Structures are given as structure tokens and as C-alpha cells.
Amino acid sequence: MFDLASKNQALKIYETLFLDSPDAIALCDMNQIVVKINYGFTQMFGFTESDVIGRPLDALITPTPEMKAESDRLTSRIMIKEKVFTQTTRARKDGTLVPVSILGLTYRISENESLMFWNYRDISALVSARERADEIERRFKVIFQNSPYPIFALDRHARLSYMNSAMDDLFDLPGYKLIGLPLSEIAGPEEREEAVLKFGECAKGKIVSIECNYVDAKGAKRNGVVRGFPIQDKEGQFDGVICFLEDVTERKQAEKQLLLERNKYKALFEFDPIPRFLIDSSRLKNLIDDLMERGINDLKAYAESHPGFLEECYNLLEIVDVNMSAIKQFAIPEKNAFLGPMASVLSQKNRNPAKMLHVVLALASELGQFSYEDPKYPRFPEDARPYHLLHTWTRTQWSDNQSAFYYLSTLDITAVKEAQLQAEENESRYRRLFENAQEGILAVDEQATITIANPAMEKMLGAKPHGLEGKSLFDLIEPGMVSLAKNSFEQGKHGNSDMLELNLLREDGSSIPTYVKATPVLDSKGGFIAGVGMFEDLRPIKQAERALRNQSATLRRVLHQTIHALSATIESRDPYTAGHQRRVQSLALSISRKMRLAPEKRAGLHIAALVHDIGKISIPTEILAKPNLLTPSEMLLIRTHPKVGFEILRKIDFPWPVAEIVYQHHEAYDGSGYPRGLSGDKILLEARILCVADMVEATSSDRPYRPAMGIDHALEQLLKLRGVKYDPAIVDACVEVFEKGFSWG
């Protein structure tokens, strides 16, 4: 242990330091045993003097292995007479850490003895300030780096010193490739000179901006505005410029679009087919406001009692613009001749004091839009029939919504008014038509109560005049059809028309079939006003239908008899193919049923199969019955029979494409058939079925040039050519038909 008593004189040298220093000071012997501490030490670390004296310093304020190792390194340095200074952390008595700066020295007390001097200064405020500064710097870096706006910086020599990620992405070029380049190389040729001048202004402390054009990474031409803000160093000297690039392409386009819109609206005004004037009402509005402030409650009474007031109003309303339609309609020699106060433009004949009073009251009420009619506006030339005009004043929508400018449209409604008169005459005419109509007509309200019925309706039901009015519509309908009628009526209330057949009850209890056209009458907003029904007596039509059905059945029998006669005629010329067409028909219909062909298509196939070889009527019998193989020229002649059959059958007005089916029945699925080389879905489905049935029947039957080859061989050939000459689905259906036991019968 260091003998403190023998060294009192040396210690007195440092006593003042211990007492007055705000830092924590500890004196230790060369074994790091504390021999003295000051008041600052107890304040900083929370130890009392008795806690510390005689104990190793490291055991007190360096509790962790890391802190102990660091303390050992510092101790080893000062033991070799080296002064150390560092910043680190030490522990208080309660275990909390305090950031400190440490000054360590070795003082030689005597020739053989020395003391270690440890000075600890609390740097919490400094560390906190540094952390805040680091955090601020970090945040600014994060903000700049992650900003969606491109940001770059120039140093005091106008060289690029920083680019954020948005700037990199904009040009798809890593910023480090540009760092260090001067502004004169970065700026575009059009903006280079101005950019250098603006940098000089920024160096003088000004905030500057410059418009620029550039091409982004995608090759798109963009418009931008660069705003530069000067940067100062610690001494307040200019240290560079931080620049923000704002993409104003859309704004520029919007400004251009706005200009186009303004020009468009100007053009719409100029070339609007409706005559329009732009009126400045500010002076008249000021007069009206003055009169209102003077307590004139009844402006109308004032105007009527002061004859010159309305005339003055014409002087205060000013025409500032007029479109081409107005110039044409009112025979204005030139536009300037119609500009100025209304009183100087309109003659006394064209002025209407009653209409001007309407304008004054509307302006006093600050109406945004108002209209009135002028039925006798003089026309040029004066002997022409006067106009019937609809004047509409519409205030222009400025930002304050208090514009004194109005668009005045003067729509010529002379023809409309004449049409209204004509409509009134038509209404009278339609009333007479309603009364004299042959069909029964009635109208019902929202509860389906009959409000009116014409004489034909009353006669149809055997009712007295006006005898149906007030009754429910559903009381006139057979009970079994009431639900159908109610459903139709509800649909009509939603604006839907309907057509249906209903049996109506007559006054004598009998019923009559009718065809009803039910039409709703709606108001301008789509609300239901009434329902109108037109009832046609179907009794004569029903009788005619019965007669027509009987006649149709007779014609159908005649048609089938004719077809069978044609088929028999064909087979009589070719004894080897007798029954061929009927057998083909039987198989084709079985295939069509297996494929669930629609009934109307099966009906056409039925006829076509019976006459599919009718074209052979043009081929000599000796060729048809030839026992040897046909020559090429004879084969060409045989191949004409589909077209000949088409020419014969197309003159018959079948309800099915019989002629076309016959024309196509030798076409192949792969396009190798004849006569037109059709393929796939371009061949009618009925013709594809007929082709398969024809092949199977012909292969399995006797022919002049060969004996019958049998069904098995025919099906084997059919499967072999499946998807080539024959439709796969039809081949599969044909095979399944035979597997299910089909026979020619």
C-alpha cells in the first residue's frame, strides 16, 4: 500500500484540483488501488469515499470483461510513462453507464514511487448532441436518398457532388459516373449558359429556378424545373447548391390543354348554331345594388313608377361579344356594329320594357340562369313574320361565382311554337282516332282501375257506354290468366312494355281470346302515370290459323310424296343402287339422333338424304351400270352429280338448306373432296353426316364393278379415315349406332 502520510507534501500540490475540479478524479498507486478521490468522483459515480479508498479502481467502475480489458490497456500505457486520452463509458455504483472522456497520467512522487492520475469528464451532453447531429444527418440522408423527387448537389466550384436514387433512376445511370463533372457538362446545350448564370446568383445567396428539357431513361422527352438553394459552411460562407428537379411535363401539357380548351370554347361560342351574346351587366347590377341599399323594397313598383328607369337599363347593359349565328340571324353587317350598350344597338322596335323588367328582377335576385319568351321579336326585313324567341341568360362561372358577365342565347322557337299548335290539333285528331279505332283500347291507373275505354272496347265486351270505367282490369280477365296479367302490369309500372294473349270476359259471361299490346305511360322522371292496352279480337285470326294448319299439313304431305317420287325416279335408272337413298337416310337420321341434332336440322337432313343422288339423273345409264372401273373422263362426269343436284333443288323453296347439303355431301373433312374442296366446319354438319352414311352404305352394298364388302369392312375403312376424310365426332357416332344394333331394316 502506498504510504500516503509520508507524501503529504506532494499531495497538497493536487489538493486544490481535487476540491475545485468539476471532473471526477481518482489517485491510485501503481497497482490501481485508490488512494484518494475528489467530490466530483462521488457525484459522478455515486460512491462514497469509504466505498472507494483502498479498493482496486477497475473493480468499481469497470464491471464487464470488455471494460476491464480496455482499462488494462490504458493502465499498461501510462505505466510506461505515456499520457493517454480517450472517450469511453464507465459504470456508476447503481450499474448505469456514463459516457466519459478519460485523461490518464503517471506522476512521479519520489525516486522509487509514482501515482496514477485518472481524470473522468462526463460527456453525456456532448454524446447526446453528437447523436442528435448524427440522427439529423441520417434523417436528411434518408429523406434525400428516398425522396421521390430527383435531388442533386453542386459544390462551391459548380461540380456535381451528390445525386439521390430518384436522380439515378430517372436517367438510369449510377450517380458515381457523374460525380465531379462540372455544371457546364451536366446541363443541356439549351440551358447551359443560363444554368451557369443561375449558379452565380445562387452563390450570392439567392434561391434560383430554371426550366429545362431532358430525356428520361425510357427515352421520353420531359419538361422540368430545377430549383437551386445555396448551402453555407460553418463560417457562413457559400459551400455549394442543393438542387431539386421537378417534373412539370404534365403541368405543361395541362397548360397547353387548357389553352386548347379555351380556344375550343371560344370556337364553340363563335360557331354555336344558337345565336349568343356575351353581356356585361356590371353597371346595371351596381345601379340595382344602390337602389336596394336606399331601402327600395319593391323594385318592381319603382320600375313601373319611373318610366325612364327601364330605358336607362338598356344603356347600362353592354354587349361585349357576339357569335356568327347571331350576326347571321339578326342581319348584323359586322361584329363591331353590334358591340356596345344595348340602347345603341337595339332599335325602339326591338326593345321590350316588360322583358327588361324581368332581367332586372332576375339580376336583383342574383339568379345564375333565367329565361323568358319574346313572341314578337321583329325580323329583318321588317315585312317578314316576327320571331318567337326564347331568351336564356346564363352567368359565366368564374372563381368567385359572382360574375357580372352573362351568355345570352336567343333561340328561335318559332317552329317549336307552331309545332305545339300543331300538337294540339293532333291531340284532337288522335282523340277522334281513339274514339273510332277498330281495336279495343283502354287506360288504367296505378291500381289497374280503368279510367277510359273506347267504344270498340265497350262493344267487344258488350258493355254500355262508359260502363267499363271504374272497374278493375283484372275483373275482365279469365281467372286462370289473372296472375299472368298482374305480372305484366307490374312490369309495366317499371317502364316495360309487353305483348301477350288474354281471354277476356264479356258481360254475358262468355269469353273471347285477345292479343294485348300493353304500354306504360311515364312522366319525365320515369314515374308511372298510366297503362294503355290495345286489345285485338283473335277470334277471326284463330279461325284462320286452324284453316292454315290444315292447309300446311296437306302441303307437307304433298312435299314428302314429291320427294319420295323423285327418289324413286333416281333409283329406277340405277337398279344396283335401288334403296340406296332410303338406307342412307335411315343411317343418317340414326347418327343425327345420336348426336342430338336439332329437330329442324334433322328434318332438312331427312329430305336431303332421300334425294342426295338426284344429280345422277343427268348421267347416262350405261355409265351408272358399268360393270368395270370407270375411266378418268367417266369419273369426272360422275363427280358432276352434286352440282347438278344443287341446280335442280335450289329452285325449290325448302325451309331447310336441302340444295346446299346435296351440293356438299361428297366434300371431305380434310378438303380433298369435291366439287369445291371445302373442309372442316365450312362443310354443313348435315352434309358431313350424309357423307359418312353414304360411304358406309355404298361400301357395304353390291356395286356393278364389285360385290358387297360388308359392314365390318365399311366401318374399318371409316375408322381408318377418321379425322382425314370424315368428321371424327360423326365417325364415333356412326360406330356407336352399329354397336347398339342398327340395321338397314
Image (tube, rainbow, N blue to C red):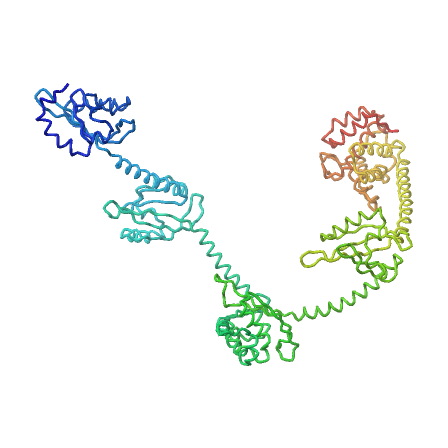
Does 383 appear above or below 583?
Answer: below
Q: Give the side of residue 233 with respect to residue 370, left or right.
A: left
Foreground residue among 192 and 85: 85
Q: In which quarter of the image is the C terminus?
A: top right
Q: Where residue 707 sits in the image (x, y, percent)?
A: 85, 25
Q: Where residue 709 sits in the image (x, y, percent)?
A: 83, 25
Does 355 appear above or below 560?
Answer: below
Q: Give the side of residue 9 with respect to residue 180, left or right.
A: left
Residue that extends furthest to the top in the rendered view of this protein: 1
Residue occupying image coordinates x 53% and y 81%:
308
Foreground residue among 69 and 730: 69
**Would you identify the image quadrant in which residue 51 lies?**
top left
Q: Where residue 740 sits in the image (x, y, percent)?
A: 82, 26
Total tally of numbered discs in the picture = 0
Foreground residue among 694 and 707: 694
Foreground residue among 179 and 20: 20
Q: Where residue 676 sits in the image (x, y, percent)?
A: 74, 40
Does 48 appear above or below 648?
Answer: above
